[in-house]
């Protein structure tokens, strides 16, 4: 059964789907990697800075539950009653990246994540994805081995993005239209 597009992908009016993230680790060429637990693991948390009535600032960190993203959540497979969390991947090669990493991308259990501010603002809430080294197991690699392993890895983050397209700049009636897409970003936070 073909699922209508408006049911398959998050609509702009659905505020709980506007901010979504998924993450995993890849090799330096962007290929899928299953992180070996003998080296470590990735974990996401929410950091919130608040100020009480007396002006005392408090920073709290809360671990965020994740699960392997399903193909339906990524918009790669049509499942009735399971709308995608991400907009259609129509930006460059994001669709190929999603398909290749579908088995290892981690999605958040909470469908209503919010962020605001940054570390320079009085109050903020941010999402942190951190690598934790393996420890307290006899099979754990040495710190040198972990460093070498991570030096060739990249963090992959997929997010929803809304942007203003000025494709029809010369047409005043349609000069700016809002486009929605899933985007994949690679970074090298582990490089030494």
Image (tube, rainbow, N blue to C red):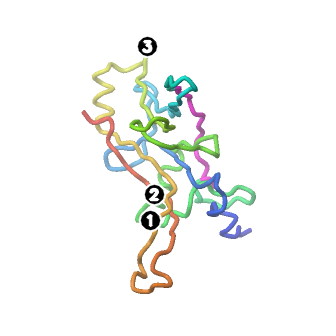
The residue stretch that appears in magenta = 60-73
**Pointers 2 and 1 in contact (CB under 8 A)?**
yes
Whole-percent x, y for residue 139 in the image = 43, 18
Front in this rendered view, residue 67 or 181: 181
Position of the N terminus, as image quadrant, is: bottom right
Q: CA distance from mark 2 to mark 1?
A: 6 Å
Q: Residue at x 57, y 33 (%)?
A: 64
Q: Residue at x 52, y 27 (%)?
A: 61
Q: Residue at x 46, y 14 (%)?
A: 137
Instruction: Tell whether 1 sits left or right of 188.
Output: right
Crowding at dot 1, Cα within 10 Å, few <14 / some 14-19 / many 20+, comes out as few
What residue is pinned by disc 1? 91
Instruction: Tell whether 65 sits left or right of 3.
Output: left
In what element is the residue under mark 2?
A: strand
What residue is pinned by disc 3? 138
Q: Residue at x 45, y 60 (%)?
A: 94
Of circles 3 and 1, the one toward us is 1
Confirm whether the magenta stretch covers residue 45.
no
Position of the C terminus, as image quadrant, is: top left
């Amino acid at each position: 059964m073909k699922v209508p597009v408006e049911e398959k992908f998050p609509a702009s009016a659905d505020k709980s789907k506007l901010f979504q993230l998924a993450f995993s680790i890849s090799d330096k060429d962007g290929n899928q990697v299953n992180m070996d637990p003998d080296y470590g693991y990735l974990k996401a948390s929410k950091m919130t800075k608040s100020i009480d009535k007396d002006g005392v600032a408090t920073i709290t960190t809360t671990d965020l539950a994740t699960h392997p993203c399903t193909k339906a959540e990524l918009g790669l497979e049509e499942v009735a009653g399971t709308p995608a969390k991400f907009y259609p991947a129509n930006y460059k090669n994001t669709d190929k990246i999603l398909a290749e990493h579908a088995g290892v991308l981690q999605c958040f259990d909470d469908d209503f994540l919010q962020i605001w501010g940054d570390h320079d603002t009085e109050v903020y809430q941010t999402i942190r994805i951190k690598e934790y080294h393996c420890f307290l197991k006899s099979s754990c690699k040495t710190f040198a081995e972990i460093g070498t392993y991570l030096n060739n890895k990249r963090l992959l983050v997929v997010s929803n993005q809304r942007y203003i397209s000025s494709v029809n700049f010369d047409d005043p009636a349609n000069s700016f239209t809002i486009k929605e897409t899933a985007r994949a970003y690679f970074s090298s936070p582990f490089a030494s």
